Image: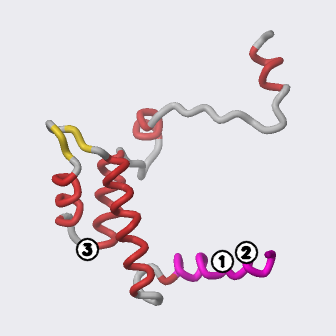
Amino acid sequence: MKIDEFITSFNNHPVLFVGTGISLRYLENTFTWDGLLSYISNELKGNDEFYYDLKYKYQNNGEYDYPKIASELEAEFHVILQGDRNGKFKNINDIFYENIAKALVLH
C-alpha cells in the first residue's frame, strides 16, 4: 500500500508532530519546555522564584522533570483561579464556568 492510499483511507487528517525545533526556528513567540513553564510561572506568581523552587525540586543530575513541574504549575493555577474568581485570570474563569454551565444543561 502506498502512503497516499493509506492517508486517504482516514476519515480525519493525521497530524505530524515534528517537535519544538521547527516552531522555535520559524515561528515568533514560541517556547522551549523550560521557557514556557517559566513564562506560566511568572504569569501566576509575578516573579521567577516559584519556578526556581519547582526546578530545584524536580531535578536529578542536572536534568529536569518538566512534566512534573507542569503538573505542579497546573495545580497552583487552579488554586489561584479558585481563590480569586475575578482577578487576573477572570476571563479564563468566565470561559470555564460558561462551559461547565453548558455541560450541565446537556446532561
Q: Residue type at mark 1? A: Ile
100 in magenta: yes
> What numbered label is drawn on residue 103?
2
Q: How crowded is mark 2: few (under 14 residues within 10 Å), some or many (20 or more)?
A: few
Residue 11 on image: x %, y % = 84, 36
Placement of 4 over or under 43, stated as above or below: above
Placement of 41 over or under 104, stated as above or below: above
Cα separation between marks 2 and 1 = 5 Å
Q: Is mark 3 on a helix, strand or loop?
A: loop
Closest to the observer: 26 or 83?
Answer: 83
Cα separation between marks 3 and 1 = 29 Å
Mark in the foreground, 3 or 2? 2
Q: Which residue is drawn at 59% across and 76% down?
A: 96
Q: In which quarter of the image is the N terminus?
A: top right
Q: Residue type at mark 3? A: Gly
Q: Which residue is drawn at 49% across and 83% down?
A: 90
Occupied quadrant, residue 10: top right
Q: Residue at x 25, y 73 (%)?
A: 46
Left or right of residue 64, residue 90 in this image:
right
Residue 92 on image: x %, y % = 52, 76
Number of numbered labels in the structure image:
3
Disc 3 designates what residue?
Answer: 46
First reached walking from the N terminus: tag 3 or tag 1: 3
33 in magenta: no
Occupied quadrant, residue 95: bottom right
Q: Residue at x 44, y 82 (%)?
A: 82
Cα separation between marks 3 and 2 = 33 Å
Disc 1 designates what residue?
Answer: 100
- Our reading of the magenta stretch's main secondary structure is helix
Q: In which quarter of the image is the C terminus?
A: bottom right
**Magenta span:** 91-107
Q: Residues within 10 Å of mark 1 (few under 14, many from 20)?
A: few
